[in-house]
Image (tube, rainbow, N blue to C red):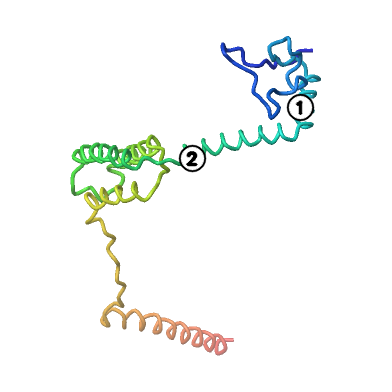
Amino acid sequence: MWAPSFAAPSAPGWRRPAAAGGTFPSCCFGDSNNSGALTDNFGHLRKATSCLNSQPNLLFQVNGLMMLGLAGVHQQINLCNESLMLERLPACGKFFEEMMKKVDSKKWCNLTEFITYYNIFTQCTEREANDASCFWPNPLAESFITGIHKQFFLNCTLDNVHWEDPPDEILIPLILIPVMLTCAMIMLVVWCSKRSDILG
């Protein structure tokens, strides 16, 4: 049966890490005559794991180094270069401005006329923020996008529709006509019923 091979690094100058006592126990790295190479079967891998578990100080040091490494990576990821982002965002705005010149200014409030350009502009701001190791959206990017909106869409406000009652000249006939038709239908039904009684 095939089994994966687990080999220690073989780069020049590599040395086996030192433990609290100066070197790792030999049980953790197999035969000392094999340059610290791990054996290629799961039985020896379990043996090495058991060896690490039997050395509390060694296991504590390994866990500590792993946590320090993860903390360093996390700190590097969260380091946002705001100056670089603010330096690159205007290029996105310049591109959008050039594209909007192709659209009639009377149609700037019609999103369907420039949706493609706006989508490219949004992707550009997101890409530049990510290249600067910043999250997107973020307050600085949103402020920049808001400035672009004010430049092109300041007059694109929604008109509030005010509903008003129709004038009395229209409202009164609309009320009286249904009422009069209802009364006429009732009178017709009553007249027809009396007529049938007389003829019967």
Give the x, y percent position of residue 158: 29, 60
Mark closest to the chain's N terminus, 2 or 1: 1
Give the x, y percent position of residue 141: 34, 46
The residue lying at 73 percent from left, 19 percent from top is 29
Left or right of residue 34: residue 11: left
Q: Which residue is mark 1?
A: 49
CA–CA distance between discs 2 and 1?
A: 30 Å
Nearest the viewer among 105 and 77 is 77
Label 2 sits on a secondary structure element that is helix
Check disc 2 and give the amino acid type.
Gln
Label 1 sits on a secondary structure element that is helix
The residue lying at 22 percent from left, 47 percent from top is 107
Check disc 1 and give the amino acid type.
Thr
Compared to residue 163, the image places residue 63 above or below, namely above
Circle 2 Cα neighbour tier, 10 Å, few/some/many (<14 / 14–19 / ≥20): few
Give the x, y percent position of residue 20: 69, 30
Left or right of residue 139: residue 191: right
**Mark linked to residue 106:** none
The residue lying at 30 percent from left, 75 percent from top is 164
Give the x, y percent position of residue 154: 23, 55
Nearest the viewer among 103 and 44 is 44
Q: Residue 175 appears in which quarter of the rendering?
A: bottom left
What quarter of the picture does the C terminus occupy? bottom right
Circle 1 Cα neighbour tier, 10 Å, few/some/many (<14 / 14–19 / ≥20): some
Nearest the viewer among 177 and 149 is 149
Compared to residue 20, the image places residue 27 above or below, namely above
**Mark linked to residue 75:** 2
The residue lying at 75 percent from left, 35 percent from top is 56
What quarter of the picture does the N terminus occupy? top right
